[in-house]
Amino acid sequence: MDIHIHNLSKKFNKEWIFKDINFNFKRGNSYSITGPNGSGKSTLLQIISGSIPATKGTVVYKSDQEVIDPEYFYQYQTQANPYLELIEEFTLPELLKFHFTFKKIAGNLSISEIINRLYLEDSKHKQIKNFSSGMKQRLKLGLAFFSESDVILLDEPTTNLDALGTKWYLNEVTKLLENTLIIISSNQKIEYEFCNKNIDLRDFKD
Ligand SMILES: Nc1ncnc2c1ncn2[C@@H]1O[C@H](COP(=O)(O)OP(=O)(O)OP(=O)(O)O)[C@@H](O)[C@H]1O
C-alpha cells in the first residue's frame, strides 16, 4: 500500500493548520509526523485515515498500483490513538473475539497467544473498564499490531506506557517494519526514532 497526498491543506474555523503538503508514503517504510503542539499531527493522521476531510487537496491510496476507493481504505488499515474507544463492558477475551470478527488475526495467533503477547493474562477476567490506562494503551496497540493490515496509523503510541511498556511497544512495532506501512504522529523521540522517514509540519505552516 502506498499513500499519495497532494496539496493537502486543513483549515479549522478561519485558521489554516497546514497548507499544501505533498508527500508519498511507501510500503516498507516507516514515517514519523512531527511538529510542535497544535501543528496538526493528529489532524493529518486523521485525514490520512479517512476519519475527517481535508479542506483542500487529495489523498490517494494505492495497492499494487491499483487505486483503492477511499471508502474501502478501512479494510487495509488499523489505528491506535487517544480518541479510539474500547468497549469497556467487555472482558479481554470478549473484546478480542469481537474485534477479530472484523479484522483477520495476523500470523495465525490464537486469542490466548495474543493475550500472552500483551502480557495481560493476569487481567483476562477483568472488564476493560477496570484496566489501568497503561493496560488499555497496550491493548489498543495490540489490536493494531495483531490484526492483518497493510497500514498502521499510530498517534502518540507510548501515551500512558511505563518503561517496560515502551520497550514492549518498540519490540512489537519494529517486527512489522518490513511488510507494513507505519505512520506515527508524535512528540516523543523514543516512540518514532526507528522510523526511516519524517514529515515536519513546521515546513507546511501558513
Ligand atoms: N475539531 C476541531 N475544531 C477546531 N479546531 C481543531 C479541531 N481539531 C483540532 N483543532 C485545532 O487544530 C490544531 C491542530 O491540532 P492537532 O491536535 O492536530 O495538533 P497536534 O500537532 O497533534 O498537537 P499535540 O502535539 O498537542 O497533540 C490545533 O490548533 C487544534 O486546536
Image (cartoon, grey):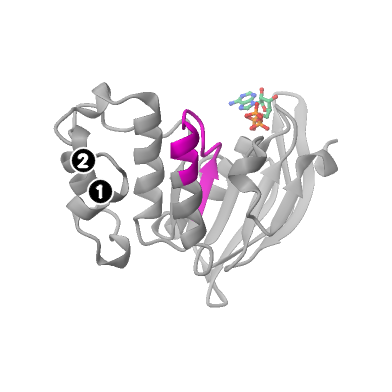
Q: Which amino acid does label 1 sit on?
A: Asn
| Most distant residue in the front direction | 164
Residue holding disc 1: 116
As drawn, 99 above or below 136 = below
Rendering coords of residue 206 (x, y %): 85, 35
Q: Which residue is drawn at 50% across and 64% down?
A: 180
Rendering coords of residue 141 (x, y %): 41, 44
Give the number of the disc on residue 151.
none
Ligand 1 sits in which quadrant?
Answer: top right
The question of residue 21 being in magenta is answered with no
Viewer-side residue, 194 vs 87: 194
As drawn, 49 above or below 157 = below
- Judged left or right of residue 107, residue 206 is right
Q: Which residue is drawn at 63% across and 66% down?
A: 26
Q: Which amino acid does label 2 sit on?
A: Glu
Viewer-side residue, 173 vs 36: 173
Say which quarter of the image contains residue 85.
top left
> What is the magenta range?
152-167
| Marks 1 and 2, how far apart at CA | 6 Å
Q: Which residue is drawn at 52% across and 44% down?
A: 154
- What is the secondary structure assignment of the residue under circle 1? helix
User: Does the CB distance between marks 1 and 2 fall below 8 Å?
Assistant: yes
Pointer 1 local density, CA inside 10 Å: few below 14, some 14–19, many at least 20: few
Closer to the chain start, of discs 1 and 2, is: 1
Q: Can residue 171 be seen in this view?
A: yes
Residue holding disc 2: 121
Rendering coords of residue 182 (x, y %): 55, 56
Q: How many labels does the image show?
A: 2
